[in-house]
Image: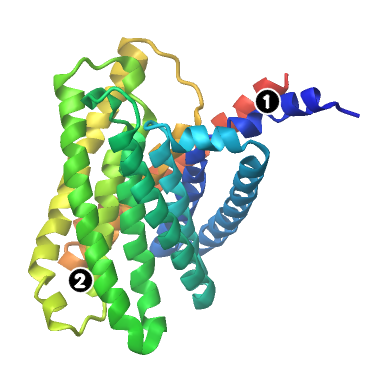
């Protein structure tokens, strides 16, 4: 039998489990939604099943890590570069809730929204408290790609809340007001964080190690804001003050899509500079799942904006991006498997 020291050594992988690994669920789930959108139903069902499996496994592993290594979890929660990664749990839970709703389980979808909202509320104030009060270099250099996961988490509450609102009967308007407020809060956070990111990237010394796949969350956060905005436009809204917001939402959805689109070539240039100019090797890292989700969300956002704007070319872009995102998902999965194979050897 293993003694305590040997057992601890064998569980080092669990102790070091990145809190942002729920990006795997996000990436798989958004592809399921995208495949349903373009009519690839067998891929939709397969990716939906994988999304549910990944979500349950990661929930169990996270609970095990909390019980077995509470100090490691505490360190992550109090680390300004890691605490925002916990928002991937919020996004993943909302994505799973959307899939539950699509498969005819509105009660489970609502349970996911409540779980995600409670997690989001706790993480939001914890993360900003860590940023404000704990000791760290109070410079723009602490800005990290995971910070934008807080925005993605906020807007994902809008997406699930919109499809769950009709199930609330007479309380549907309460949810609709809530999701409008969340969408606007997400815009404010995005404006704050993207200003810091642009200053950090374009006006401070930028090293190849700063070019992480997490930078793709810049596009992902803008795309999910677009998607949530078009959802608000298409929602069954009756309150006059919410209807009055539609022109503003319409313009902001288009603006966010344009901004997300502008960043895609820029992020590709960053990758070329890192791996082909500065010759950093390409190797699997968990953050790569945070590159897949923005591509899938951009595809979904383009499709829905095209419908709202009655502009078919956005649908063509969407169809192409679904397959690009799926190709990147497959390559990332192969990289994940290869990394495990090397570790076993």
Asked whether 74 or 25 is in front, the reply is 74
Residue at screen point 30% across, 49% down: 151
Residue at screen point 49% across, 65% down: 112
Asked whether 208 or 182 is in front, the reply is 182
Res. 302 visible in picture: no
- Could you tell me which secondary element the residue under label 2 belongs to? helix
Q: Quadrant of the N terminus?
A: top right
- Which residue is outermost to the top? 278
- Which residue is outermost to the bottom? 170
Q: Quadrant of the C terminus?
A: top right
Residue 138, image x, y percentages: 25, 25
User: Can you identify the residue that label 1 sits on?
Assistant: 341
Residue 241, image x, y percentages: 12, 78
- Could you tell me which secondary element the residue under label 1 belongs to? helix
Residue 258, image x, y percentages: 15, 47
**Residue 136, labelled with which disc?**
none
**Residue 153 in the figure: left or right of residue 75:** left
Residue at screen point 51% across, 26% down: 284
User: Can you identify the residue that label 2 sits on?
Assistant: 233
Residue contact at pointers 2 and 1, CB within 8 angstroms: no
Q: Quadrant of residue 134?
A: top left
Sequence order check, earlier mark of 2 and 1 = 2
Asked whether 286 or 8 is in front, the reply is 8
- Which residue is outermost to the right? 1
Counting every numbered tag in the picture gives: 2
Q: Quadrant of residue 267?
A: top left
What is the crowding at mark 1: few (fewer than 14 residues within 10 Å), some, or many (at least 20)? few
Give above or below for 150 relative to 309: above
Give above or below for 217 relative to 38: above
**Residue 158 in the figure: left or right of residue 310:** right
């Amino acid at each position: 039998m293993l003694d305590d020291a040997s057992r601890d050594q064998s569980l080092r992988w669990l102790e070091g489990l990145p809190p942002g690994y729920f990006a795997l669920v996000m990436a798989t789930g958004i592809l399921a939604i995208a495949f349903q959108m373009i009519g690839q139903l067998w891929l939709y069902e397969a990716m939906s099943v994988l999304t549910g499996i990944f979500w349950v496994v990661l929930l169990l592993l996270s609970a095990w890590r909390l019980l077995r290594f509470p100090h490691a979890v505490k360190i992550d929660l109090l680390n300004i570069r890691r605490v925002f990664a916990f928002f991937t749990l919020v996004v993943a839970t909302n994505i799973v809730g959307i899939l539950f709703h699509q498969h005819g389980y509105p009660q489970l979808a609502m349970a996911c929204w409540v779980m995600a909202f409670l997690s989001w509320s706790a993480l939001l104030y914890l993360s900003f408290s860590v940023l404000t009060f704990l000791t760290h270099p109070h410079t723009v250099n602490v800005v990290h790609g995971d910070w934008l996961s807080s925005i993605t988490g906020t807007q994902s509450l809008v997406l699930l809340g919109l499809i769950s609102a009709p199930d609330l009967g007479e309380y549907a308007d309460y949810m609709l007001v809530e999701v409008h407020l969340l969408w606007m809060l997400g815009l404010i956070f995005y404006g704050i964080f993207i200003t810091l990111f642009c200053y950090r990237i374009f006006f401070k010394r930028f090293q190849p190690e700063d070019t992480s796949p997490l930078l793709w969350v810049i596009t992902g956060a803008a795309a999910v804001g677009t998607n949530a905005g078009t959802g608000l436009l298409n929602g069954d809204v009756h309150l006059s003050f919410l209807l009055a917001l539609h022109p503003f939402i319409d313009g902001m959805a288009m603006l966010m899509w344009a901004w997300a689109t502008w960043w895609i070539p820029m992020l590709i240039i960053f990758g070329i500079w890192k791996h082909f100019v500065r010759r950093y090797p390409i190797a699997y890292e968990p953050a790569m799942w945070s590159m897949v989700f923005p591509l899938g969300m951009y595809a979904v956002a383009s499709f829905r904006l095209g419908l709202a704007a009655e502009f078919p070319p956005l649908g063509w872009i969407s169809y192409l991006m679904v397959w690009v995102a799926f190709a990147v998902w497959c390559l990332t999965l192969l990289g994940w498997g290869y990394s495990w194979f090397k570790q076993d050897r």
